[in-house]
Image (cartoon, coloured by chain):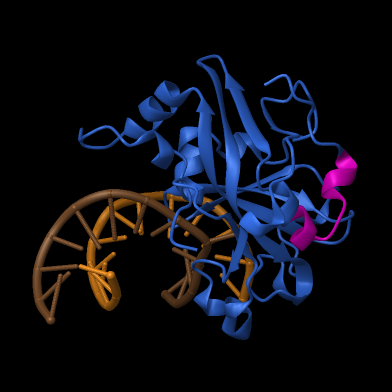
Chain colours: A blue, B orange, C brown
Amino acid sequence: LRRQPLDRAFFARDALRVARSLLGKILVRETKDGVVAGRLVEVEAYRGPHDLAAHTAGGRRTPRNEVMWGPPGYAYVYFVYGMHWCMNAVAAKEGAPEAVLLRAVEPLEGADLMQARRAEGRAKGRPIPVARLASGPANLCKAFAVDRSLNAADLCDPRSPLRLLDAPPVPLAKIRATPRIGVDYAGDHAELPWRFCLAGSPSVSADG
DNA sequence: CCACCGATACTCT
DNA sequence: GAGTATCGGTGGG
């Protein structure tokens, strides 16, 4: 993990481009317990006021989604369903509330630590397969210890406890586009193919 | 394989 | 008060 963080300009593009470009990049999380890292294999684009599936649909600006309205390259972390955290990378320029939901990574480092975090507060069962430790947006946040305290964290800062590192682009032919998950409330917009997966990755959260 | 269902608490109307 | 960018378990084809 000697790679450089992604720079601000990487995120200062529309969410669709940022989402596709993020596949294959490296998410890193450092705490006193150690380092975990993984390769992004599944993301979703949320495209601002026009996108009925986005938290900023219709131009809504609230305390929760405030970070989405700010400059690109920061984490937008939110809480759902009474128990789960999810994280986004803010995209586009300041004032354009776009973001990319990070849905799954393939673990590269710290699988033991991820396993321990995933095991918290659950009946002891078999260990989770490594490829599944950060599969799904809430599982990813659990494995990476992402919660409200990281809302607005700078993903471009090499000293940030949560950051995104550059890596070679994945072959275009390996990118699959599907409708986004869990946005049935969005009417027609629920069908837009704005979820992107790395074909064949065992860490993708559902078949895409 | 699919369909539902409950958990659980924050966010905004 | 209603709704939720989820997950894991259960129960039926």
Q: Quadrant of the N terminus of chain A?
A: top right
- At a point 27% along the width and 32% down the height, the residue shown is A127
Name the dominant secondary structure of the magenta segment.
helix
Residue positioned 75% across, 62% down in the render: A16
Viewer-closest of A3 and A71? A3
Residue A129 visible in the snapshot: yes
- What x and y, as percent, mark residue A2? 72, 19
The foreground one among A186 and A40 is: A40
Q: Which range of residues does the magenta coloring cover?
A: A8-19
Above/below status of A197 relative to A169:
below
Residue A50 occupies quadrant: bottom right
Answer with the quarter of the image where residue A105 lies.
Answer: top right
User: Looking at the image, can residue A67 be seen?
Assistant: no
Question: Is the residue A149 above or below the residue A185 in the image?
Answer: above
Horizontal and vertical percent position of residue A94: 89, 54
Q: Is residue A14 magenta?
A: yes
Q: Is residue A121 above or below residue A175?
A: above
Q: Position of residue A103 (x, y in %)?
A: 55, 51
